Amino acid sequence: MNTFMMVLAYTREHPAVILMLTALISIGIMTLMMFTHNAKMVDAVTSKPLSLTAEQAKQVAMRHKLRPAKYAFLIPAALATDETINTWADAIAPRLGTGFQPVEVTIIPQKLWIPARYRVTFARLEALR
């Protein structure tokens, strides 16, 4: 009980320390979330049948939406063909998590300096209902 009272007294005297610790912890959590997001993206695009190299994986963008749970991959069209993208989408869906399946594969045409891309969208099964 005495220790708890000392902690309360310390927090009253030094609120800046508590704010700095809270900020550091939140920065650490955000960094961990970004690391797992990038690791999941690299793991997905380097798997077979797509098999992109590390340099090619940097050209791919992954977007994550929480409600409903979706993953959208933007893959440059120069790196893959239609058959490769379709077989990759079917093979990678279970690796993204339980209940994910490929929902939509669209081709985004080239615009000015932005090259053509494939948009592969995966959604959780509950989100489709």
Image (cartoon, rainbow, N blue to C red):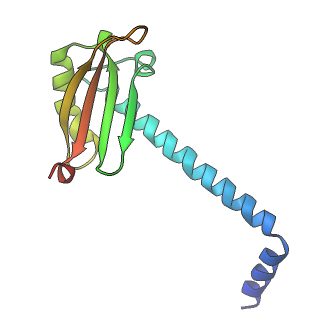
- Of residue 48 and residue 28, the one placed in the foreground of this image is 28
Residue 75 falls left or right of residue 83: right
Question: Depth check: 20 or 129 in front?
Answer: 129
Tell me which residue sits at (29%, 26%) in the image: 47
Q: Residue furthest front?
A: 112
Q: Quadrant of residue 44?
A: top left
Residue closest to the eye, 67 or 6: 67
The residue that appears at 74% across and 66% down in the rendered structure is 18
Residue 101, horizontal then vertical, whole percent: 18, 40
**Numbered circles on residues, count:** 0
Farthest bottom residue in view:
1
Name the spot of residue 33 as percent of width and height, x first.
49, 46
Asked whether, in this view, residue 49 is left or right of residue 5, the answer is left
- Determine whether, in the image, residue 58 is placed left or right of residue 78: right
Comparing 57 with 72, the one in front is 72
Give the residue at x 33% y 21%: 75
Q: Position of residue 59 (x, y in %)?
A: 43, 19
Vertical placement of 35 versus 114: above or below? below
Say whether residue 54 is left or right of residue 129. right
The answer to whether 115 is drawn above or below residue 126 in the figure is above
The N terminus - image quarter = bottom right
Q: Position of residue 129 (x, y in %)?
A: 14, 53
